[in-house]
Amino acid sequence: MTGNHTYSKMMLPAPVRVWRYRLWPMTVGHYAVLCRLDSPLIDGNKVPLAGDLASAIWVLKQDWRRAYKHLGQKAHTKFVLKIGKKFNRHPKFHIAVLNEFYKYWAWQNAAYDIWKKDEEGQPDRSMSWLQTIRWVLMNQWGYSSDEINDLPYKLAVNDCFGAMVANGKLEFVSDKQRARREYIMQNIKEENAI
């Protein structure tokens, strides 16, 4: 696979079917709606409960604007209650749908650890990940707010990183460089312990 092939898949992602629902490719707008719902999918450290999974499917099965417009209204609540109850009554079914959903999620969203805490006890970053994506794409690429919300999420993240690397704000570290840094840090700790 070439870089162009991979990048084109980010530009033009295909819809995916999870259970009986055809999910839209996740856009920055979808990601923002999931952040608004405080979805455990965004944090990545929690397994979504039945209601969380149902709510995420509801958001991603439609255009993000429609999902945001109807958030918390009868259609949203009814869907989450109906599907959430079905998942609770049939735990194996819930796990099967969750596994299908994770395949979708793994392609749409990658864990970008640079915006998480480096170590326990360290302060959060001054700017949230969503805010950073929007700021970089508006300032470096000239996108409008609406254009950013409609961008496929993975493409937006890739373009954001591209701008940050081009401007020297971010450097990618190879596994070899990371291993060397860890080796040096271990030696420094050992010398200071003596």
Image (spheres, grey):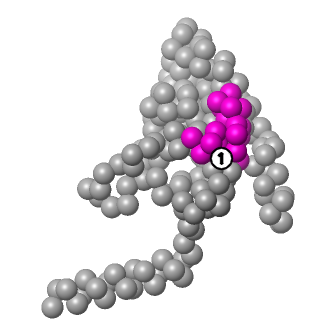
In the picture, measured across the screen, residue 18 lies left or right of residue 76, that is right
| Quarter occupied by the C terminus | bottom left
Residue in the picture at 53% in, 55% down:
112
Give, as a three-letter code, the residue at label 1.
Answer: Gln
Horizontal and vertical percent position of residue 174: 57, 75
Residue in the picture at 62% in, 20% down:
67
Query: Does the magenta portion include 186?
Result: no
Where are the magenta residues, as a range? 135-155
Query: Looking at this rendering, what residue extends furthest in the left direction?
Result: 194
Residue occupied by mark 1: 140
Horizontal and vertical percent position of residue 140: 65, 47
| Quarter occupied by the N terminus | bottom right
Residue in the picture at 67% in, 35% down:
148
In the picture, measured across the screen, residue 76 lies left or right of residue 25, that is left
Q: Regarding mark 1 in the picture, which secondary structure is present there?
A: helix
Label 1, residues with CA under 10 Å away: few <14, some 14-19, many ≥20: some
Quadrant of the rendered image containing residue 98: top right
